[in-house]
Image: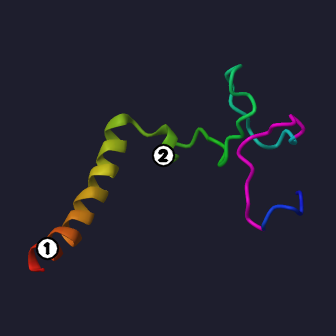
């Protein structure tokens, strides 16, 4: 790893094309310089593999939970 980057930094674009092959790249011809971090997997619990309905359910749960916290505070002030 290049020491000019702070620890924990992940490059998302491979401009020189010299990145090692253990990191997945985008598969289309236009964006082949994009590094896929984290690397997508075939595991069903990977959020990239969730159905559209499951993604909407997870997003809705976040909004409902935030609303339960935020809305009462708005009405009390």
Secondary structure beneath dot 2 equals: helix
Queried whether the magenta region covers residue 13, the answer comes back as yes
Determine the residue positioned at 74% across, 38% down: 24
Main SS of residues in magenta: loop
Determine the residue positioned at 67% across, 41% down: 36
User: How far apart are labels 2 and 1 at the CA level?
Assistant: 31 Å
Determine the residue positioned at 33% across, 50% down: 59
Q: Which mark is residue 47?
A: 2
Secondary structure beneath dot 1 equals: helix
Residue range of the region highlighted in magenta in the rendering: 7-18
* Quarter that holds the C terminus: bottom left
Decide which of 20, 40 is in the foreground and name it: 20
Q: Position of residue 28 (x, y in %)?
A: 67, 22
Residue 67 vs 24, above or below: the answer is: below
Residue 56 vs 72, above or below: the answer is: above
- Local crowd size for mark 2, using a 10 Å CA cut-off: few (<14), some (14–19), many (≥20): few
Residue, far top: 29
**Is residue 33 shown left or right of residue 70?**
right
* Quarter that holds the N terminus: bottom right
- Local crowd size for mark 1, using a 10 Å CA cut-off: few (<14), some (14–19), many (≥20): few
Q: Position of residue 8 (x, y in %)?
A: 73, 65
What residue does disc 1 label?
Answer: 72
**Is residue 62 shown left or right of residue 22?**
left
Which picture quadrant has residue 52? Answer: top left
Determine the residue positioned at 62% across, 41% down: 40
């Amino acid at each position: 790893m290049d020491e000019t980057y702070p620890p924990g930094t992940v490059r998302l674009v491979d401009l020189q094309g010299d990145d090692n092959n253990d990191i997945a790249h985008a598969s289309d011809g236009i964006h082949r310089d994009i590094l896929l971090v984290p690397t997508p997997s075939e595991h069903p619990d990977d959020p990239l593999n969730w159905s559209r309905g499951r993604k909407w359910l997870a997003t809705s749960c976040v909004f409902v939970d935030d609303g339960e916290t935020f809305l009462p505070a708005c009405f009390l002030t």
